[in-house]
Image (cartoon, rainbow, N blue to C red):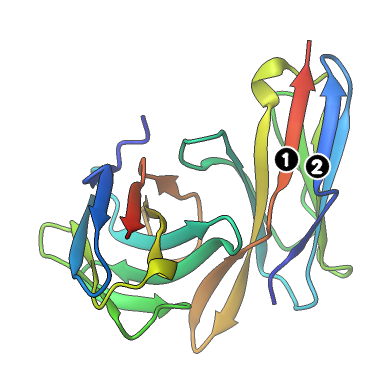
Amino acid sequence: DSGVTQTPKHLITATGQRVTLRCSPRSGDLSVYWYQQSLDQGLQFLIQYYNGEERAKGNILERFSAQQFPDLHSELNLSSLELGDSALYFCASSVTASYNEQFFGPGTRLTVL
Amino acid sequence: QQPVQSPQAVILREGEDAVINCSSSKALYSVHWYRQKHGEAPVFLMILLKGGEQKGHEKISASFNEKKQQSSLYLTASQLSYSGTYFCGTDRSTGGSYIPTFGRGTSLIVHP
């Protein structure tokens, strides 16, 4: 158990819908990363927040957005969902903003039908 | 910009050694290695900072050659528990922040 929690574990929805994925980092970690993992694309970095502010942005679509709240939990919002958005979404946390050891949550498996 | 891992897959018997390579076309600030078992989250193994430092974690060690922009992960006397997919990750510096980028992974299967 990494200490990072993610909810829900599974999500099944239809195209065009909007969903919210939630992540709580390890106690004491200020940085949260979001990743998308699919079979054909591997592990893709989406976005990083550090202490409530956006720190780095990767291959995140405009339909996707995220935020980190004062209690440091983070949410990833996915809207206008398409079939290709079906994937495993991981969040990870680390102590600092600079790249270092990341602790991954168990992931949310999103299926878009 | 994605680091390239080789080989794509390795099949071993318990007790055998393996080497997984990771190379990048861009200058590297650090290299990190993770192992992911099927259906589970990636688990951090080690991080190497530029300077050619070699680190170890029990029977798993790694090297980082900054000049060649390469890293190698060494698994000695492999155990059944080593089975999984190994990812190397690198950082791409952009505008003062670092973008983590992962290779496609190397699948390691250890047989009894």
Left-right relation of B37 to A109: right
**Residue shown at 36% from the left, 76% from the top:** A55
Q: Tell me, for residue B107, which label it has, or none.
A: 1
Secondary element type, mark 2: strand
Question: Which percent across, then down, holds residue B104?
Answer: 68, 57
Amino acid type for the residue under numbered disc 1: Ser
Quadrant of residue A78 in the image?
bottom left
Quadrant of residue B38 in the image?
top right
**Label 2 crowd (10 A; few <14 / some 14-19 / many >=20):** some
Amino acid type for the residue under numbered disc 2: Ala
**Chain letter belonging to callout 2:** B
- Residue under label 2, please give it: B9
Question: Which percent across, then down, holds residue B35?
Answer: 61, 39
Question: Which percent across, then down, holds residue A4?
Answer: 30, 42
Quadrant including the N terminus of chain B: bottom right
Secondary element type, mark 1: strand
Left-right relation of A6 to B2: left
